[in-house]
Image: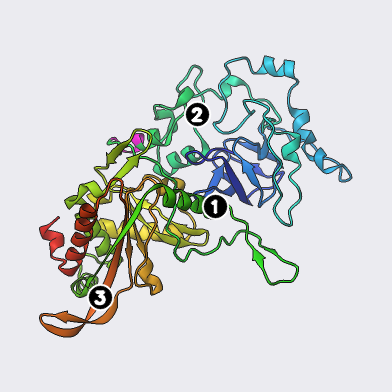
Amino acid sequence: MPDVGEGLTEAEILKWYVQPGDTVEDGQVVCEVETAKAAVELPIPFDGTVHELLFPEGTTVDVGQVIISVNVGGGTAPAAPAAEAAPVAAAAPVAAAAPAPAAAEEAAPQGRTPVLVGYGVAASSTKRRARKAAQGAAPAAPAQAAPVVAPAPVPVTVPEQLNGHGPGGGRPLAKPPVRKLAKDLGVDLATVTPTGPDGVITREDVHAAAAPAPAPAVQAPVPVAEPVAAPAPVQAAPAVSTDARETRVPVKGVRKATAAAMVGSAFTAPHVTEFVTFDITRTMKLVDELKAGTDMAGLRVNPLLLIAKAVLVAVKRNPEINAAWDEAAQEIVLKHYVNLGIAAATPRGLLVPNIKDAHAQTLPELSASLSELVSTAREGKTTPAAMQGGTFTITNVGVFGVDTGTPILNPGESAILAVGAIKLQPWVHKGKVKPRQVTTLALSFDHRLVDGELGSKFLADVAAILEQPKRLITWA
C-alpha cells in the first residue's frame, strides 16, 4: 500500500480490478482505494502475472503493507494452496518464494535502491495490531503471515530496476500516483530531474517538467468541508441491530478525516461569523445576460460563478484575508495567490477541491474550472492533489433552500464564505417597497489573524460588488 497522499497512514480497498492469474502491464490500474482524502486508483509498476491478492475488498490496510503479489519473472505463478489448508496457509506460496536470509543478502547487497516507492520489503518487522475485517469478508490472515514479503516471488536483478538518473540507467524511481500524473500530463519520467530523497521523482518535479514556470509552494492542509448536508458514505456496509430499529455506519475514509479536522478546527481557531443581507437582483440579471451572450457560449453561467469572481476581487482589495496561521513558528503567512475551494456534495461526503491560482483566471476560465471541479467531484474522481493547498473556501448552502449558516474553517485557511438561498422578497428600492432578489452571506474567519475590521470590510466588499456588479470591472 503506497502513500498516495501527504501523511497518509492507511487506506481502504474499495475494488479490485484484477484477479489471480490475470496478466498486468506497467501502469495498469489494479485496484481502487479510499484514503482519508479521496478515492484513488492504484497502478501496478510491473509487467507480469497476478499471483495473489492479499486483502479482500472492504479491508483497511496500513501504508507499507503488501496488498498484491505479481510474478514478474515471465513464468507461471506458483500453484494455489490446497482447499483444505488452514486460512493462514494462503500466504505460504509468497513466503516460500522469498529468498533465505543469506541468499537475500547476496541478491540484494547493502545500499540497494528500492524498486518502487511505497512497495517492497518493509524497513523493519514492526508488528501491527490486528484489524477487524469488513462485514461479510473473510479475515485478512495473509497480512499476519507475510507482512514483509516482497510482492514479486521471482527476484529482479538490481541493474533492471535502478533509477534512470543514477548509475546503470533503467526505470526512474517514483510513486505510482506520480507515474500516473506524469502519464496524464504527457511527461517522460526519464527526462525529469528528481528532487526527492534517494532520487525519488515527486509531484512537484513532474509539474515543473510539464510547465517551466513552477507554481508557488503551498501548505497542504487536510481537505475537509463544513458540516452541511453531507451524505453518508455509500460504500460502507452498515451493521443493522437485531431489532432492525438502528443502523450503524462505520466512520472511516473521508467522513473520518472530516470529523477529526472539524473538531480540530473548531477547538483550535477562534471562530467569528458575520452576516450581510443585500439585494442581488442586478447580479441575477447579469447572469441572464451572460447566458444569452456569445462571450460565454458553451460555458456554465450561474450565480456562484459571479460570487466566486466577487470574492476574488474582494481578496485583491483585502489581501490580509487570504492568509494562514503558523502555530509552530508563531507567524501569519500571507498568500499572494488564491486557491479557491468550492464545497461539493459527493457520494463519499462533502469534499472541498480547489481551483489553483483562481485569482489569475478570466471569467470564462473560471467558469470552465468550476464546471470541471464540480463534475469531477460528483463523479467521485477528485484526487488528493486537487484538495490540497486551498487558501479560501466558498460553500453554497443556498442550493438546499437554507438562508445562511455558520461554516467551520478548513484547517490552514483563515476564512470561509457561506452563500444563502436567493429569494424574491419585499425590499426597499429607490424609496419604494418592491419585490427584489435578496440573499444573505455569512463569513467565518480566524480571529487570531483576521480582526473585526478586516472581516467586515471584506464581507462588505463582496456584497457591494454583487449589489452593483459593474464594480467587477472598476475594482478588478
Element under disc 3 = strand
Above or below, 433 relative to 318: below
Q: How many marks?
A: 3
The mark closer to the camera, 1 or 2, is 1
The mark closer to the camera, 2 or 3, is 3
Residue 398, percent from left and from top: 36, 70
- Which image quadrant for residue 20? top right
Q: Which residues are magenta?
A: 208-212
Left or right of 38 on screen, residue 371: left
Above or below, 474 relative to 123: below
Task: State the residue lying farthest toward the right.
Answer: 84
Q: Residue at x 64, y 18 (%)?
A: 108
Q: How far apart are labels 2 and 3 at the CA level?
A: 56 Å
Residue 120, percent from left and from top: 62, 30
Q: Residue at x 62, y 49 (%)?
A: 13
Residue at the spot of label 3: 438
Mark 2 or mark 3: name the one nearer the start of the chain.
Answer: 2
Residue at the spot of label 2: 173
Mark 1 or mark 2: name the one nearer the start of the chain.
Answer: 2
